[in-house]
């Protein structure tokens, strides 16, 4: 009798295992690509988005994150989104190829500080830029990630623009950046970031400008002594999803995507602030000295140069630039 009971219980147990329904496969799988490495705050925030969207959608939406340009560079990935091969990307001023207002995402001395940047992003100005992205780039911003301000490094302290006369500085291949540094009487040289360390080591250039994270990751503390706190560019970048794809989602899943984006944005801001402090501490420990500069003097020279450059863009871009500068 005991044997029969044991067999009966075992059969019920086995049947119960097979009767348990398997977890439902996700209805949508998002492919998200970006250019940063796995240690960057953007990647960690992307993973946070993936975690949140899966949770908020009850598993109906999952997100695969591809770092280090595995899906291609920004423009390549945007084009892949347009053709349905990818779904999301972290992108910024590259979008000006479609929407000219995106040229304002990184403009010297337009944004004064992080508080000003936050106000701009949450105001009607920020909404206007987002609407332009949706309408013209066919991408919908779900998060706005902040970027650390760009600072000048050198082997002598620089406090005023006139101290840059003849100073050979590496800049990225951004025409507006070149124009502004020429206004400071420096000699800007566009150059790939991969060439900067050697060029500094061999005195081909005197200095360069970048956020603290890139100064650290590029080991520039080995060939530069000073971080001059010019803070000449406060910018931001967006985590976006393809608008056509977004519109095909049911309304509740659209909300899950947008809510996950907000959660990722808050998380990235926390990581960003901790990262800035850690990078400053690290560079100081490596012997770099931080120099306070006359920012109003730099800004006064940069403003007219920026406005002159923006006259080559549609009139609406210059108008929006002035609104941002005037925002208190």
Image (spheres, rainbow, N blue to C red):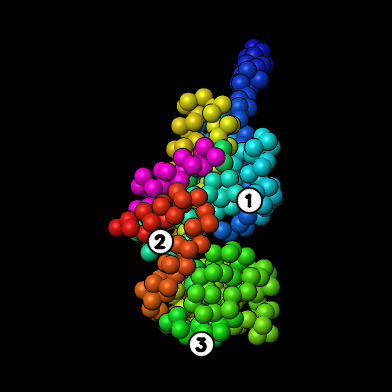
Relative to 228, is 214 on the left or the right?
Answer: right
Q: Residues within 10 Å of mark 1 (few under 14, many from 20)?
A: many
Q: Residue 79's spot in the image, x, y percent? A: 66, 42
Q: CA gap, disc 1 to disc 2?
A: 24 Å
Magenta: main secondary structure:
helix
Q: In this picture, which residue range is highlighted in magenta?
A: 117-136
**In this rendering, does residue 148 appear at all?**
no
Rounded to the nearest whole Å, what is the CA distance between mark 3 and mark 2?
26 Å
**Position above or below: 256 against 190:** above
Picture layout, residue 176 above or below residue 197: above
**In the image, 9: left or right of 312?**
right
Q: Name the foreground residue: 119 vs 258.
A: 119
Q: Horizontal and vertical percent for residue 48?
A: 51, 46
Q: Which structural element holds mark 3?
A: loop
Of 174 and 244, which appears nearest the observer? 174
Q: Secondary structure beneath disc 2?
A: loop
Instruction: Check disc 3 and report the residue beneath it.
Output: 156
Where residue 137 appears, as percent x and y from the top left, is 57, 41
Q: Relative to residue 128, is residue 169 depicted above or below?
A: below
Which residue does the image show at 53% across and 57% down from the upper left?
312
Mark 3 or mark 1: whose residue is earlier in sequence: 1
Q: Which badge, 1 or 2, comes first in the chain's sequence? A: 1
The residue indicated by pointer 1 is 74
> Which residue occupies 47% across, 85% down?
163
Name the residue furthest bottom: 156
Mark 3 crowdedness (10 Å alpha carbons): few <14, some 14-19, many ≥20: some
Where is mark 2, residue-wise? 111
**73 on left or right of 283:** right
Task: Check residue 152 for magenta coloring.
Answer: no
């Amino acid at each position: 009798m005991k044997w029969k009971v044991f067999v009966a219980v075992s059969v019920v147990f086995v049947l119960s295992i097979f009767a348990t329904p398997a977890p439902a496969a996700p209805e949508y799988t998002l492919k998200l690509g970006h250019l940063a490495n796995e240690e960057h705050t953007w990647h960690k925030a992307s993973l946070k988005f993936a975690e949140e969207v899966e949770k908020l959608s009850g598993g109906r939406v999952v997100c695969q994150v591809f770092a280090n340009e595995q899906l291609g560079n920004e423009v390549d990935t945007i084009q892949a989104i347009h053709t349905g091969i990818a779904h999301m990307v972290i992108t910024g001023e590259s979008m000006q190829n479609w929407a000219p207002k995106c040229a304002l995402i990184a403009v010297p001395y337009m944004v004064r500080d992080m508080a000003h940047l936050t106000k701009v992003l949450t105001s009607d100005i920020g909404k206007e830029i987002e609407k332009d992205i949706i309408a013209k780039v066919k991408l919908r911003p779900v998060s706005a990630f902040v970027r650390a301000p760009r600072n000048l490094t050198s082997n002598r302290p620089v406090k005023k623009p006139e101290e840059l006369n003849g100073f050979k500085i590496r800049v990225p291949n951004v025409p507006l950046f070149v124009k502004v540094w020429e206004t400071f009487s420096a000699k800007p040289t566009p150059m790939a970031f991969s060439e900067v360390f050697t060029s500094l080591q061999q005195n081909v250039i005197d200095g360069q400008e970048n956020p603290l994270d890139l100064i650290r990751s590029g080991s520039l503390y080995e060939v530069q002594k000073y971080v001059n706190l010019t803070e000449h560019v406060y910018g931001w970048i967006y985590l976006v999803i393809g608008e056509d794809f977004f519109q095909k989602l049911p309304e509740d899943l659209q909300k899950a995507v947008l809510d996950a984006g907000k959660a990722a944005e808050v998380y990235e801001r926390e990581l960003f602030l901790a990262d800035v402090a850690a990078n400053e501490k690290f560079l100081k420990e490596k012997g770099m000295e931080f120099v306070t500069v006359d920012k109003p003097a730099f800004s006064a020279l940069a403003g007219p140069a920026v406005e002159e450059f923006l006259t080559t863009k549609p009139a609406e871009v210059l108008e929006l630039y002035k609104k941002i500068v005037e925002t208190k």
